[in-house]
Amino acid sequence: MSKFEEHIEVKGARVHNLKNIDVTIPREKLVVITGLSGSGKSSLAFDTIYAEGQRRYIETFSAYARQFLGGLERPDVDKIDGLSPVIAIEQKTTSKSPRSTVGTITEIYDFLRLLFARASDAYSYNTGEKMVSYNDEQIKLLIKESFLGKRINILAPVIRSRKGHYRELFDQIAKQGFVKVRTDGEVKDLVKGMKLDRYKTHDIEIVIDRLKIDDSADNDKRLTESINTAMYHGEDVLMVLDQDTNEARYFSRNLMCPSSGVSYPNPEPNNFSFNSPKGACPKCNGIGRLYQVNENKIVPDDSLSIKAGALAPHGPQKNSWIFKQFETIVQRYNFELTDAYKSIPDEAKQMIMYGGNEKFSVESKTLGVTRDYKIEFEGVANFIESQYNNADSTSLKRWAKEYMDKVECDECQGSRLRQESLYFKINNSNIAELANKDIIDLADWFNDLHNHLSEKQILISEEIIKEIKTRIQFLLDVGLEYLSLNRSSKSLSGGEAQRIRLATQIGSQLVGVLYILDEPSIGLHQRDNEKLIKSLVSLRDIGNSVIVVEHDKDMIEAADYVIDIGPKAGKYGGEIISIGTPKELLTHHTLTADYLNGTKQIEVPKKRREGNGKYLELKGCTGNNLKNVSIKLPLGKMIGVTGVSGSGKSTLINETLYPIMNAYYFNGVKKPMPYKSIKGLEHIDKVIDINQSPIGRTPRSNPATYTKTFDEIRSLFAKIPEAMIRGYKAGRFSFNVKGGRCETCQGGGLRVIEMNFLPDVYVECETCQGKRFNRETLEIRYKGKNISDVLNMTINEAVDFFEHIPKINNKLKTIKDVGLGYITLGQQSTTLSGGEAQRIKLATELSKRDTGNTFYILDEPTTGLHFEDIRVLMIVLNKLVNKGNTILIIEHNMDVIKTVDHIIDIGYEGGKGGGQIIVEGIPEEVAKHKKSYTAKFLKKELN
């Protein structure tokens, strides 16, 4: 092998904060890039190596194709040699569409659809009998066997259980030369102008032939012709009616129920897809859930009268059309608009909510005359529903949504599929039941399947089942046995989504590819870490190069080669401070090495906090996989909630506890998962949930705007004498409103080049060179810096720059305290990692005055943090708890778990095997537990 083929050589990388670095990365090895948060790991792995690989791939397209892709910018690097095709598996790349599920991302569901279309048995949804299908020759033999010597009618069914008068249909049948029809079980002659009652449901069949069955050749020929004609008019279904007993039997070329005559089309894979009109449930369009009007939201307080505003969408009485309608309804049902809503007659409530059409007359007592009234009213609930379904404007839809709840579709019971698709079964299970099984149960089901299939089914399905089994195995290998195929990809954590993509990649068995992963161990319990490392090693062993950006100790120790970037973060980072095998790394004096070899460590506290003696008790939680869980949270302590992935931590805290608290303190509307009771809410003032969702979805959002520091900075600039002379107000210094911003890029600093079928590309605005403001605004300076310079400062620089302005300084200092001194004030939120976004939220909350009685919920705050960053974060959190606040952390990181005051461990496994409390107490007690996985790893840390 030549030198190039053994290494990837990067020369002169200067992207973001990289300081013109040269690095040689061995190929076909597992390489870990580590270092402090913000030191430049992602800049090297994603923005340099991956970006260049992507650019070279696009260069191979024809000039015609490239014009749609635009030029991808060259990363700022002198050269990269030895690069192979690159696949990046990042955290941010899952689809937010409700149609995307674990099954569709991994393609297992596509294979399942194929399996059901080719090897399943169909059953009737009317009688549960197995469906049958015949060819014309078999039908003829069956008729001869069953009806020999009997008089029969051969009928072609054209209408089944539908309303209408069908006058045109009868005319059409007569024109085709037929003389009799059977309507609703009665044979009649066709007469001109014949019609039925349009408001009743009807069954109509054409009488094709009436004959007596015998063995003669003429009879055989006549029967064959009649069958053909009946099949043509009845769309591959015919009916044979015994004239003596009046009993009917159905025959079909398609799948058909022998007794009720229900027929299904022959199954195709898209009959089982909830993304295709052929398979999706017609009511919810294959989403499985739909919005339904909630009357309690329309009338939140039924002690009010309609006049006083009992109907929330309409408010108190005004002179409007809708209130005139209500006055008419008052006349009809004899009540007053000033009556409390609960005392109104039920028929009136029904009319107000769901409308109606009726005429009525009221006798006037004083005048002695009757007046006629007419009500034509759509109904408040119906109006809200029609606005939600048909309105073009998003704000109207949002308005309607306020009075609706998302509920399971009652037609498909959340299975997303049409009724007939659910009656195709293999081994007594339909496709929706399989999609709802946990992956581990699904694996068992497939392993046992060959014992329940016929020889023909085995022959057809052998290859498909092999594909499904290997893909399921890969999901088990990366520790995702607790997910189900039906799980929406929106609800996956960053780490889960990334591991699903990893499983898909391992499944594709490519060779010679460079994989770059961004912290795949997020959200993974130490127990499953070994599985993940095995998967990455197997990727390497089939001949791929794997680069992982990671802080996890186990991952660093399992690597073939480690690159440590530092020494600090932001502009003080961007250099390679050590490189080599994990063993060589331990001998270097870098921060990472110090934590790995034990020179530095996050200390276990000498004694645990006592708390304030008050408790928050939550009882009887049964959401998702929780098995009637009750917890008692000691207040005034730092509480850790631990357990393997999928054990029910998020269900218990984020889906049950937080919505209850949010509704109690801030009238939040999110419905908590089912629980029995909660006690002790009065001991706390407010609840704050700090999760990993991005702090803003547009490039306009940044740390300065999110923490509201920018408002103070703009007010400061507006007070500068020069600005006051020119009459500039604070709005002049905003890049979101007209006036001070550059109008070419509308204050974005970037222009979007829209790509067909590819993500949009952002390029620097040529008018303001990315400064976001126009020339006049930039002429206003404070201490020699204009507003654009301030946005480009790092937090560390800004803390010194604004040291004499307490309002700004206090907010910036908290951002610095959580270890984010290296980011710039104006850094786009979209470029912040999940961990950084979470710490900015934390800083925002910390800069507010705390009541000393706040309940904080943090979901995996150590994501993306180096050992040193975790130490800094824990100092900040401990300060909060020392003031009397309570912090609850959902976490897998042992460095955090060993420092908390109280642990609640949920398990034992993920999915069905989880959902119960294994052990709770101080870390020392928890570590003694025999069966808990957390205890096993915690013991090592405490010793």
Image (cartoon, rainbow, N blue to C red):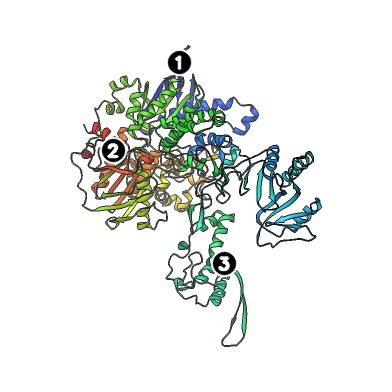
Q: Quadrant of residue 519?
A: top left
Q: Give the residue type that dot 2 points to.
A: Val
Q: Of callouts 1 and 2, which one flags the residue occurring earlier in the amino acid sequence?
A: 1
- Residue at 54% x, 69% y: name it: 351
Q: Are marks 1 and 3 in contact (CB under 8 Å)?
A: no
Residue 88, label in figure: none
Q: Of callouts 2 and 3, which one flags the residue occurring earlier in the amino acid sequence?
A: 3
Farthest front residue in view? 149
Residue 360 on image: x %, y %? 61, 76
Q: Which residue is mark 1?
A: 6
Q: Nearer the viewer, mark 1 or mark 3?
A: 3
Q: Nearer the viewer, residue 384 or 652?
A: 652
- Residue at 46% x, 30% y: name it: 46
Q: Are marks 1 and 2 in contact (CB under 8 Å)?
A: no
Q: Which residue is mark 2?
A: 896
Q: Give the residue type that dot 1 points to.
A: Glu
Residue 928 on image: x %, y %? 22, 36
Locate residue 663 relative to residue 875 in the image: left or right. Answer: right
Q: Is residue 794 shown to the viewer in this render? A: no
Q: Which residue is mark 3?
A: 355
What is the spatial separation of the Cα atoms under label 1 and label 2, in whole angstroms?
Answer: 40 Å
Disc 1: CA contacts within 10 A as few (<14), some (14-19) or many (>=20): some
What is the spatial separation of the Cα atoms under label 2 and label 3, in whole angstroms?
Answer: 59 Å
Disc 2: CA contacts within 10 A as few (<14), some (14-19) or many (>=20): many
Disc 3: CA contacts within 10 A as few (<14), some (14-19) or many (>=20): many
Residue 335 on image: x %, y %? 50, 77
- Residue at 57% x, 88% y: name it: 366
